[in-house]
Structure formats: C-alpha cells, structure tokens
C-alpha cells in the first residue's frame, strides 16, 4: 500500500486525518495578511457599535433601535466569526489547496480524478473567550446539505498554542453518527448554529495541527470548536472539497482550471 492509500485508509477509519506539511507557506502568509487586516477592521466596526465579548448575547437579543435589519444581519455574521463576502471570495484562499501532497490525498479519499471547491470558503476569526464564534458539537453535513459528499480541509493560519483551542474531534464517530435527517428547527436561540449533538462521545481529542499542516474531516465526523482562551484572535479557514463523482447545487471552483461555475448551468466565470 503506497503512502497516499495508507493515509486515505486512516482517514476513512478514524474519520479525520492530520496531514503535515501540505499547505504552501507563502500561501499561508498571503492569507494571514488578508485575514489579519480584515479582522482588525471587523473589531473596529464592532467596537464602534458597542459590541464586545461581554455583551454580545444581549446585543443579539435586543439590538439598538438605530440598527436596521440588514446591518443587524451583517453584525450578527461578524460576531459569529465570519468574514465579509469579499474576503471569502479572495483567490488567496484557493491557493491553500495548491500542494500536490494535499490534492493527491484528497483525490484518493474521494476516489476522484478532479477536485472542486465549494464557493465560498469559510475563513474564521475567533476572538478570545468568544462563545458565539465557537461552533457547538456538530457534523459538517448539517451545514452543507447542498453537497452530496465532501471533505472539509481545516487550515490554521498560524501555529496555535494549546490555550488558543482549535478543533476537538471525536474519532470514529462518523460510523455511529449517521442520523439521516437533519432537524432544521434544532437551532440555538441566537439562530447562529445548530443545537449541539451527541453528548455520549466522551471528551474527544483536541487536534494538534501545526503551521503548514491541515486537518481533514469526514462530513459525518462529530467535532466542535474549542474555546479560545488566549489573548489573541484565532484565524483559520474551512475549505470544503468534493470530487468529480460528487455534486453541489451552489457555486463551485474547478481547482484544476481555477474557474468558478454557476450551480446547475455550468456557466464559467474567469
């Protein structure tokens, strides 16, 4: 069994895989610059609106009267750790998937000859002690019902110290967590995330992913965000990759041609 086949077998057995030295460091540098700048701007916007870690929940429950529905929706997305659309659409994020080491493993896992990326990727910023930006225990299929199959590639933008948290995984839970229907009403009161699932899986494992490495997640693996207890904003990126045997009803990027396609129509965008 060659090394790629061995890694794919390990992924399917455990439900996740830490793949070392598979993210080009220049690409990480470009993404760090992009996200750090945007994160600083987001922090400024939230401070100007009086939103801080200590009052986020009360803000969401009763926003100021001078904030209209559109602005409230944007602020809600920002405090949950999301970036604006122009940042999600930035080509620098695609280049995180530029190494042959990573793409060869993904092709083997997905039994694919070509790879595609759901558009848009999900870069994330998690402020210190922010509980709302920490995604509760879930499987990625819950949030991506438009895709028939995929692998999530989670990339820390720089090395995380232990108190910065990251992703806590529950090994082999993809074999026992296949509830076929997702209850769309099972949302938390703030409507940011699905309510936590599966409380019977123990403490899990905090994935230790070094700079330049990636965490690959099965779409049915139970995992959750670990709280950021450091004094720094935690930056990462989620990229959902699928193969030529799979499908999506949303926009996607052909990773070979670097072309964006409209859903269903097949229309390309340079």
Image (cartoon, rainbow, N blue to C red):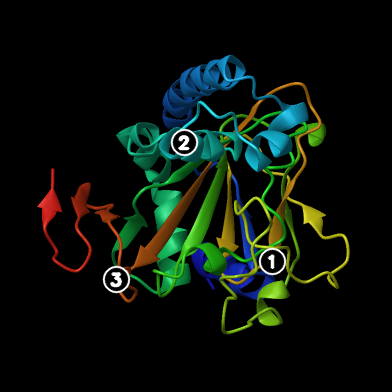
Secondary structure of residue under mark 2: helix
Find disc 2 in the rendering and name its residue: 74
* Residue appearing at x 68%, y 29% in the figure: 127
* Residue appearing at x 21%, y 50% in the figure: 260
Residue closest to the eye, 261 or 9: 261
Secondary structure of residue under mark 3: loop
Dot 3 alpha-carbon crowd within 10 angstroms: few under 14, some 14 to 19, many 20 or more: some
Give the farthest residue toward the front: 65
In the displayed structure image, the side of residue 109 where residue 136 appears, left or right: right
Find disc 1 in the rendering and name its residue: 222
Q: Is residue 109 visible?
A: yes
Dot 2 alpha-carbon crowd within 10 angstroms: few under 14, some 14 to 19, many 20 or more: few
Count numbered badges in the picture.
Answer: 3
In the displayed structure image, the side of residue 171 where residue 49 appears, left or right: left
Residue closest to the eye, 16 or 120: 120
Q: Does the CB distance between marks 1 and 3 fall below 8 Å?
A: no
Q: Earlier in the sequence, mark 3 or mark 2?
A: 2
Secondary structure of residue under mark 1: loop
Q: Does the CB distance between marks 3 and 2 fall below 8 Å?
A: no
Residue closest to the eye, 66 or 187: 66
* The image quarter in which residue 12 lies: bottom right
Find disc 3 in the rendering and name its residue: 244
Between the C-alphas of marks 3 and 2, the distance is 34 Å
Q: Position of residue 36 (x, y in %)?
A: 52, 21
* The image quarter in which residue 124 lies: top right
Number of the front mark, 1 or 3 = 1
Q: Does the CB distance between marks 1 and 2 fall below 8 Å?
A: no
Q: Earlier in the sequence, mark 1 or mark 3?
A: 1
Q: Earlier in the sequence, mark 1 or mark 2?
A: 2
Would you place residue 241 above or below residue 199 in this image? above
């Amino acid at each position: 069994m060659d090394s790629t086949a061995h890694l794919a077998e390990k992924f399917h057995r455990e439900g996740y895989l830490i793949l070392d030295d598979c993210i080009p460091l220049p690409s990480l540098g470009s993404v760090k610059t992009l996200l750090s700048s945007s994160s600083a701007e987001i922090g400024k916007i939230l401070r100007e609106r009086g939103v801080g870690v200590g009052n986020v929940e009360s803000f969401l429950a009763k926003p100021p009267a001078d904030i209209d529905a559109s602005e409230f929706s944007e602020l809600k997305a920002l405090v949950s750790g999301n970036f604006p659309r122009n940042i999600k659409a930035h080509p620098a994020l695609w280049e995180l998937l530029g190494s042959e080491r990573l793409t060869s493993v993904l092709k083997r896992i997905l039994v694919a000859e070509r790879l595609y990326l759901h558009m848009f990727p999900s870069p994330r910023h998690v402020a210190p002690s922010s509980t709302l930006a920490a995604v509760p225990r879930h499987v990625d299929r819950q949030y991506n019902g438009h895709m028939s199959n995929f692998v999530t590639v989670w990339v820390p933008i720089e090395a995380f110290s232990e108190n910065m948290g990251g992703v806590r995984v529950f090994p082999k839970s993809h074999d026992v967590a296949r509830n076929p229907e997702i209850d769309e009403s099972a949302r938390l009161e703030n409507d940011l995330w699905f309510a936590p699932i599966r409380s019977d899986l123990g403490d899990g494992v905090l994935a230790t992913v070094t700079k330049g490495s990636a965490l690959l997640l099965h779409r049915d693996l139970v995992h959750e965000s670990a709280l950021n207890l450091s004094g720094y904003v935690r930056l990462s990126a989620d990229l959902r990759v699928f193969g030529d045997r799979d499908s999506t009803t949303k926009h996607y990027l052909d990773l070979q041609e670097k072309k964006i396609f409209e859903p269903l129509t097949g229309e390309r965008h340079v």
